[in-house]
């Protein structure tokens, strides 16, 4: 599929490629937070974030809470 075709299809769905990638990463992060004991830093690294702070910021934007809060850590 060409980049232009992908862009056109995503436009029909009122979304952008970056938003789609971010959602997939956050969904995977939620799975990892629930199913593993990896640290927040390890999860951030696994998902391609440059550091835990960027990951936490992105997670909070989508979920309205930090990864630690989502996991239930205090």
Image (cartoon, grey):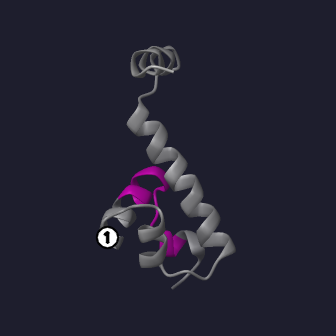
Q: Determine the residue positioned at 43% across, 68% down.
A: 44
Task: Report the magenta stretch's main SS.
Answer: helix
Q: Is mark 1 on a helix, strand or loop?
A: loop
- In the rendered view, tell whether residue 11 sits above or below residue 50: above
Question: Residue placed at 42% from the left, 20% from the top?
Answer: 7
Task: Give the x, y percent position of residue 34.
Answer: 66, 71
Towards the viewer: 22 or 57: 22
Image coordinates for residue 18, horizontal then vertical, percent: 39, 38
- Extent of the magenta region: 58-69
What number of labels is visible? Answer: 1
Q: In this figure, which residue is indicated by the disc labeled 1? A: 51
Q: Crowdedness of circle 1 by 10 Å Cα count: few (<14), some, many (20+)?
A: some
Quarter residue 45 falls in = bottom left
**Residue at the (46%, 56%) spot, across then down:** 64
- Give the quarter of the image for residue 31: bottom right
In the image as oriented, which residue stretches furthest toward the right?
A: 35
Residue at image x 49%, y 81%?
39
Q: In which quarter of the image is residue 16?
A: top left
Residue lying at the far front of the rendered structure? 1
x and y percent of residue 55 in the render? 38, 64
Give coordinates of residue 60: x percent, y percent.
41, 59
- Above or below, 42 against 55 in this view is below
Is residue 64 magenta-colored? yes
Q: Judge whether 45 appears above or below 26 on screen.
A: below
Horizontally, is 1 left or right of 45 in the view?
A: right
Of 61 and 38, nearer the camera is 38
């Amino acid at each position: 599929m060409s980049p232009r075709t992908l862009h056109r299809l995503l436009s029909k769905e009122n979304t952008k490629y970056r938003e789609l990638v971010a959602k997939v990463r956050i969904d995977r992060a939620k799975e990892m937070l629930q199913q593993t004991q990896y640290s927040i830093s390890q999860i951030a690294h696994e998902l391609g974030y440059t550091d835990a702070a960027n990951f936490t910021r992105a997670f909070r934007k989508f979920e309205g809470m930090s990864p630690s809060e989502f996991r239930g850590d205090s």
